[in-house]
Image (spheres, coloured by chain):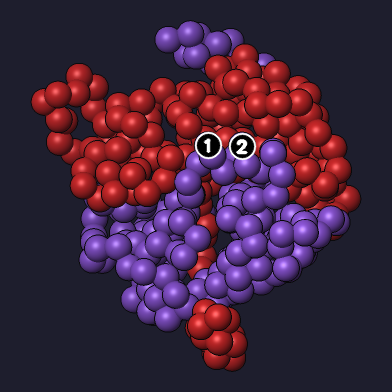
Chain colours: A red, B purple
C-alpha cells in the first residue's frame, strides 16, 4: 500500500495544476483521417485543428495525421496515426480507449453512430450498469475504441452543474 | 469509403447533442479504489462521486467500485472495477487508455506522478512528438493507462480559450 502512503503525503502539498485533459486515440496508420471523419459523422465532432506529419513515409500513399483535435460537446479528444517509435509504444500498451458520452437521446445517438459505421455491443441497459447510473448503450468504433452512450442522469447533472 | 458518404449526409442534419465526454478507465477488480487514490496523488484528482457495487462478491474482500467520478482540471474521468459481464467485455476490448494532461510545469507533474507510483516511459520530448506540439513526458500508471504530460502550447491555448 505504498501508493496510499505516498498519496497521504502528497495531498498535503497540492502542487501541479492541470489545464486540460484530453483522451488520446491512437489509430493504426493511415486510418486517423478516416477516424476523424467517422467521429464527425457518428458524434458530431468539430475539428479544431489538424497537424500533419512533416515527413510523408514512402510506404504510405497519404500523409499521416500527427494530431487532430476534435471537439465533442465541450470536451476535446485527440486522434493520431501511429507514426514513430513513440507512438508505437503507446499503441502497443493500449488497444483502445473507453469513452463515456452523455446525451439526452441515447437511442438517436446509437442510431447515428451505427449509421456512421460503429457496431453495437449488447442491448441498452439501465441502472447500475452505467457510468452514471442512467440508461446506457455501447458501441465499438471501427478503430478499436468503445463508446458508452449514456443518458445524463440526475446524479451526473448535479455533478456537471 | 461508405463512412465518408454517410458522413456527408449526416453532417447536413446535425442531430444528437452530447452534454459530457468522460474517459472511462476500467481497472482489474478490486484495484479501482487504489487507482482512485493514485489519481488523487499523481494528478490532484478530486473525487466527485463514488457508487459502490451493491452486491459484494464472495471472492472479494472489499466492496467493488461501480463508478467513481474524478475531476482533473476541468475535466471528469470515470474509474470502475471490472465487475460483471458487461465490464469484462469492455476490459477485453481495451487494455488501457491514453490521456493527454496539459500543465505549465511538465517536470513537476512528472515528478508528482512518479512519486505516486507511475513509471516514466522515455524522455521528455519536444515539438512534433506531442499531442499539441509542446513539450511532453509520458508515464504509465500502475493500472495500465498511459498519461502524456504536455506543456500547454500556444496552439492548444488558443484552442482552449
Determine the chain carrying the residue at label 1.
B
Q: Provide residue A17's location: percent of width, then percent of height.
A: 51, 74
Q: Provide residue B70's location: percent of width, then percent of height.
A: 66, 64
Residue at the (36%, 26%) spot, across then down: A31
Examine the rendering and report whether any part of residue B121 can be seen: yes
Instruction: Tell me where residue A82 sits by quadrant.
Output: top left
The residue carrying mark 2 is: B89
Instruction: Tell me where residue A129 sits by quadrant.
Output: top right
Residue lying farthest to the left in this orientation: A58
Q: Is residue A49 above or below residue B23?
A: above
Q: Are marks 2 and 1 in contact (CB under 8 Å)?
A: yes
Residue toward you, B116 or A35: B116
Specify few, some or many for label 1: CA neighbours under 10 Å numbering under 14, 14-19, or 20 or more: some
- Badge 1 marks a residue whose secondary structure is helix
Q: Provide residue B105's location: percent of width, then percent of height.
A: 39, 75
Residue at the (77%, 57%) spot, across then down: B57
Q: Which mark is residue B93?
A: 1
Left or right: B31 in relation to B149: right
Q: Provide residue B111's location: percent of width, then percent of height.
A: 38, 79
Residue at the (60%, 40%) spot, across then down: B90
Examine the rendering and report whether any part of residue A46 can be seen: no
Let me know if marks 2 and 1 both belong to one chain: yes
Amino acid at each position: 500500500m505504498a501508493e496510499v502512503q505516498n498519496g497521504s503525503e502528497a495531498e498535503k502539498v497540492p502542487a501541479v495544476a492541470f489545464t486540460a485533459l484530453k483522451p488520446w486515440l491512437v489509430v493504426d496508420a493511415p486510418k486517423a483521417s478516416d477516424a476523424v471523419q467517422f467521429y464527425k459523422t457518428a458524434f458530431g465532432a468539430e475539428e479544431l485543428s489538424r497537424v500533419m506529419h512533416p515527413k510523408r513515409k514512402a510506404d504510405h500513399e497519404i500523409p499521416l495525421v500527427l494530431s487532430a483535435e476534435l471537439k465533442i460537446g465541450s470536451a476535446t479528444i485527440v486522434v493520431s496515426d501511429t507514426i514513430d517509435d513513440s507512438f508505437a509504444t503507446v499503441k502497443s500498451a493500449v488497444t483502445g480507449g473507453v469513452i463515456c458520452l452523455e446525451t439526452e437521446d441515447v437511442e438517436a445517438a446509437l442510431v447515428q453512430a451505427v449509421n456512421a459505421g460503429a457496431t453495437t455491443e449488447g442491448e441498452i441497459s439501465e441502472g447500475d450498469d452505467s457510468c452514471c447510473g442512467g440508461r446506457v448503450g455501447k458501441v465499438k468504433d471501427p478503430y478499436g475504441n468503445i463508446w458508452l452512450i449514456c443518458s445524463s442522469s440526475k446524479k451526473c447533472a448535479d455533478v456537471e452543474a
